[in-house]
């Protein structure tokens, strides 16, 4: 009986984290596209010094998402 519950639990956790990883991957793709669009708009400005904080924040956010997805994949392998 407890073996069946453990199998269902493991399968449920696997599915839930699979769905979470799919959303993280979609978020990374959208964030990367947005970062490139923001960078092109930023290069069009004459005074670039005040807007670099937005790029740094976007890059760090993408880095956190990538590291989160890597750690989730490593945990389940």
Image (cartoon, rainbow, N blue to C red):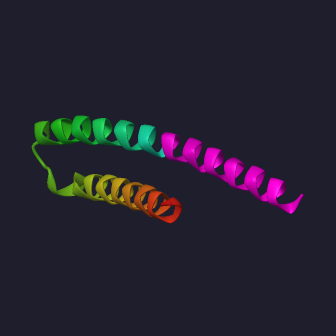
**Quarter of the image where one finds residue 28:** top left
Queried whether the magenta region covers residue 16, the answer comes back as yes
Quadrant location, the N terminus: bottom right
Q: Could you tell whether 75 is left or right of 54 in the image?
A: right
Q: How many marks?
A: 0
Magenta segment main secondary structure? helix
Q: Is residue 61 left or right of residue 14?
A: left
Q: Position of residue 40 (x, y in %)?
A: 16, 36
Relative depth, front residue between 48 and 16: 16
- Which region shows up in magenta? 1-23
Measuring 12% from the left and 36% from the top, which residue is drawn there? Answer: 44
Q: Quadrant of residue 61?
A: bottom left
Residue 8 in the image: x percent, y percent?
76, 50
Q: Position of residue 35 (x, y in %)?
A: 27, 42
Q: Is residue 60 magenta?
A: no
Outermost residue, right direction? 1
30 vs 71: above or below:
above
Q: Residue at x 50, y 40 (%)?
A: 22
Report the front residue among 48 and 75: 75
Residue sitting nearer the eye, 6 or 46? 6
Please provide percent x and percent y for residue 67.
Answer: 39, 61
Q: 19 left or right of 26? A: right
Of residues 21 and 4, the one drawn nearer to the viewer in this rendering:
4
């Amino acid at each position: 009986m407890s073996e069946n519950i453990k199998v269902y639990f493991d399968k449920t956790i696997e599915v839930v984290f699979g769905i979470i990883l799919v959303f993280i991957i979609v978020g990374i793709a959208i964030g990367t596209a947005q970062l490139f669009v923001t960078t092109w708009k930023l290069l069009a400005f004459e005074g670039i010094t005040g807007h670099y904080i937005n790029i740094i924040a976007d890059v760090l956010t993408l880095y956190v998402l990538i590291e989160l997805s890597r750690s989730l994949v490593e945990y389940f392998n």
